[in-house]
């Protein structure tokens, strides 16, 4: 009888330990994801290292920007980034917030606000404000990478009180 209870309690303890060890640190994962996204934004704003910028996307990523066809795969994304950085006056920077994780901690999404400077129709720089939604995946190497990067133009700011 006592041996049976020891086996039963050992089994229960084993299940509890297995369940608790399979849980992930959601707060830590969110902080890591925000930090990784900020590093990516800083690399893009610096505009110097195409390979570093592109390394934040998965090999099968898709980028959807307003007025552009969907850009699919790292090779096409690399060409898009290189072309953007080669455009005189181009700059980009974003800030993301509120990451949400899947229950298993392998996928996440977050929204962001992007400011991009591009040449206007007359060649003079214009600032475009975008709102974005990015979907991230935890890759086998333990790094978060963006699998879907979707942006659209932000509505104009509402006028303040007069």
Image (tube, rainbow, N blue to C red):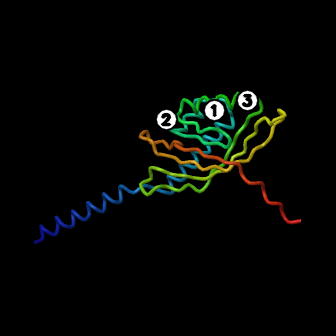
Q: Residue furthest bottom?
A: 1
Q: Is residue 120 left or right of residue 57?
A: right
The residue pinned by badge 2 equals: 59
Do labels 1 and 2 touch, CB within 8 Å? no
Mark with earlier residue (2, 3): 2
The image shows residue 103 at horizontal and vertical percentages of 43, 57
The residue pinned by badge 1 equals: 81
Q: Residues within 10 Å of mark 2 (few under 14, many from 20)?
A: some
* Residue at 62% in and 38% down: 69
Q: Is residue 22 left or right of residue 105?
A: left
- Label 2's element? strand
Mark with earlier residue (1, 2): 2
The image shows residue 125 at horizontal and vertical percentages of 81, 37
Q: CA distance from mark 1 to mark 3?
A: 10 Å
Taking depth in this image into account, of 81 and 105 the one nearest to the observer is 81
The image shows residue 4 at horizontal and vertical percentages of 13, 68
Q: Residues within 10 Å of mark 3 (few under 14, many from 20)?
A: few
């Amino acid at each position: 009888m006592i041996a049976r209870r020891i086996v039963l309690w050992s089994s229960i303890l084993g299940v509890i330990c297995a369940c608790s060890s399979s849980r992930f640190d959601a707060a830590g994962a969110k902080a890591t994801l925000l930090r990784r996204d900020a590093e990516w934004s800083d690399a893009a704003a610096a505009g110097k290292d195409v390979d570093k910028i592109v390394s934040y996307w998965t090999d099968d990523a898709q980028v959807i920007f307003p007025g552009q066809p969907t850009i699919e795969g790292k090779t096409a994304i690399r060409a898009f980034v290189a072309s953007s950085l080669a455009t005189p006056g181009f700059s980009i920077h974003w800030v993301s917030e509120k990451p949400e994780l899947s229950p298993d901690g392998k996928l996440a999404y977050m929204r962001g606000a992007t400011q991009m400077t591009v040449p206007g129709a007359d060649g003079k720089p214009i600032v475009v404000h975008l709102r974005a939604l990015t979907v991230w995946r935890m890759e086998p190497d333990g790094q978060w990478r963006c699998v879907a990067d979707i942006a659209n133009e932000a509505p104009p700011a509402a006028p303040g009180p007069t």
